[in-house]
Image (cartoon, helix red, strand yellow):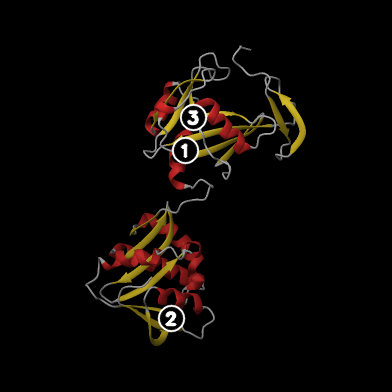
Amino acid sequence: MNMYENTGESWDLYTKDREKTGRTHRRGLPVPEGSYHIAVHICIFNSKNQLLIQQRQPFKKGWPNMWDISVGGSAVAGDSSSQAAQREAMEELGLELDLSGERPFFTMNFSGGFDDFYIVEQDVDLTKLRLQPEEVRQVRWADKEEVVKMQALGTMIPYWFLDRLFDIRGSYDRQGERIHCIRTGFAGLAHLESWMSLAQVIRYDLPGMDTEEAIQGYCGSVIQHIKEGAAIYAADGNMLVGVLLFSATKGKISCLAVHPEYRRQKIASKMLELMQTKLEPGCPLTVETFRAEDAKGEAARSFYQALGFVPGALGTLDHYPVQTFVWTGGGE
């Protein structure tokens, strides 16, 4: 054990369910079996999606001289997880952070406890940092490519998830909620499986789609529309969350639907805007949906009216009573 390690530090001990046992443990001794402590890490990113990394001192116990993520340490007795993270940032970098309202972005279990990871976005001025000489040799910014290369060269601690941090940062907010990044486009056959998975979700929002035979017929229609360049999708990642089938020559929309969990995000409007690139200016389009007296129709009718569709003639679709709605652009 070298002279730079703080062996006087005590940790609170927890059960496997992260409940305090009321006992403490002195750092440097083996953690008692069945007991665990809290470790913390902070991953600081700047606006260029670069990660602040630190090189550990060559005399540091545990991964000496290796490059590490921004901040790391253990919660001392009496610390909460966020308090420990704030304290470690100040001790190692001289950087004041307010994490009082934050929860860990994710937690990794290890043999001795729970490792909480926080993600912070801040354009830190490296020249103003005060590095802890007992712990930190130097710091710098590194992008994803550099970090992956350093791991391959054996100079970066081999966190298995390190490259994913750069992707997670843009996909989830600081509370761990997924950020929806919706894109639209014209569908290809590669989208068919996800399209039909969504069809199972929205089938009861569409007239005449309540049988397996109807689903099979719908699949054939989707394929035909894809081949004609008249199938539009909205996707969150690889998952389709909105679909639109139309015919410019017939002046008709045969399907327009959005996943229930993705509504009120203007997804339908985005698909309609893309569809307009295939239409003559001012070309009206019709769509058939449930009649007013149909118990299934309230949500669908409200959906179309919010998009700017107006009620039209009554009719039937595959022997199912429907009402035509007319769209001339605008809405939402």
Q: Quadrant of the N terminus?
A: top right
Of circles 3 and 2, which is in front?
Answer: 3
Q: CA distance from mark 2 to mark 1?
A: 51 Å
Residue at 48%, 23% (x, y): give it.
131
Residue 234: x %, y % from top left: 39, 60
The local secondary structure at tag 3 comes to strand
253 to the left or right of 158: left
The answer to the question of whether label 3 and label 2 lie on touching residues, with beta carbons closer than 8 A, is: no
Residue at 59%, 15% (x, y): give it.
4
Residue 24: x %, y % from top left: 74, 28
In the picture, the disc for residue 318 is 2
User: Which residue position holds label 1?
Assistant: 165
Q: Residue furthest bottom?
A: 314
Task: Tell me if I can see residue 224 in this picture.
Answer: no
The local secondary structure at tag 1 comes to helix
User: Which residue position holds label 3?
Assistant: 69
